[in-house]
Amino acid sequence: MQIVTLSLFRFSSPTGRLWAFAQMGLMHPAIGRLEGLCFYKLLGTGAGAGFSLKPDFSTYALICVWQDMAAARRAVGQGEVHAAYRRHASQMATLYLTPTRSRGQWAGQAPFTVDPETVPRRPIVALTRATLRLKKLVPFWSQAPGISDEIETDPHQRFMMGLGEVPYKHMMTFSIWDDEAAMRAFSLDSASHGVAVRRAWQEGWFVEYLFARFNLIAIDGAWPGLEPFAQRAQETAPAGAREAA
């Protein structure tokens, strides 16, 4: 079964933040050597929840796709990449996920493979990623403050981060919702995001687009906002995933 990990790293000191920023260019060879790795992206983050015009230079992320849980556990627990981040970060957590739905491409690839036997369950974990056309950067980001304000007050949104490979041009949101209905209501029907999505499709804002959903299997480490999900993920994970942990 394919496993996706999202590792989050926070750096509290100026030297730590400088090190993390440099790794956006320097860490790629080491990541490429990881056994069982199928796809990865190093990501910066935005301030606040969801969409933000302001970058957060204290927080970075690494998303990886693995052949199986054994490869994922081995890399996160013993691999040189996560060990290096562990030495420099003030806080670190890794989420283990299995894809339940995926549509679109990321850098010309379809990175997530859905096992037809995987049954989606709550909470709903969603990943949305897009590459914006240069001439559409201004209209897209002009929508950002309203979307961010609305999503932070949505009672059914339990966790959200805005991430991306290149500021402003590439955007990704990772979010956790109570259920499918709540996520779809915000995504398609809200006054901010729903309107922006319809306009984006009508006016062709995106060069590339990917939407995926996942089951949350496990969480290593601690991160603000993820505490309620750590034990729940372990209790509801498939037996094979628990044994691999």
Image: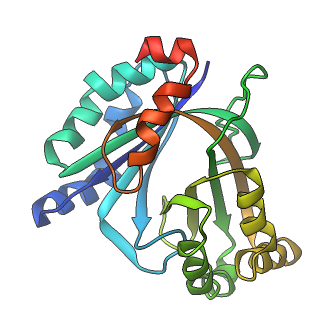
Residue under the point 55% across and 82% down: 149
Compare residues 145 and 156 and report the one nearer the observer.
156
Q: Quadrant of residue 224?
A: bottom left
Residue that appears at 39% across and 73% down: 55
Q: Front-most of 150 and 128?
A: 150
> In the rendered view, would you say 49 is above or below 143?
above
Q: Is residue 151 visible?
A: yes
Q: Residue at x 15, y 57 (%)?
A: 16
172 vs 19, nearest the viewer = 172
Quadrant in which the N terminus is drawn:
top right
Q: Give the image quarter of residue 75.
A: top left
Left or right: residue 120 compared with residue 202: left
Relative to residue 190, is residue 67 drawn left or right? left
x, y (%) of residue 56?
34, 70
Find residue 81 and report its horizontal and vertical position in percent.
28, 34
Tell me the quarter of the image containing the C terminus. top left
**Total marks placed:** 0
Where residue 57 appears, x then y in whole percent?
30, 68
Q: Where residue 148 appears, x then y in whole percent?
A: 55, 78
Can you tell which quarter of the image residue 186 is in?
bottom right
Q: Is residue 163 left or right of residue 137?
A: left
User: How has the structure been colored for display?
Assistant: rainbow
Against 50, residue 6 (above or below) is above
- Residue at the (29%, 25%) spot, across then down: 77
Q: Is residue 27 visible?
A: no
Q: Is residue 74 left or right of residue 154?
A: left
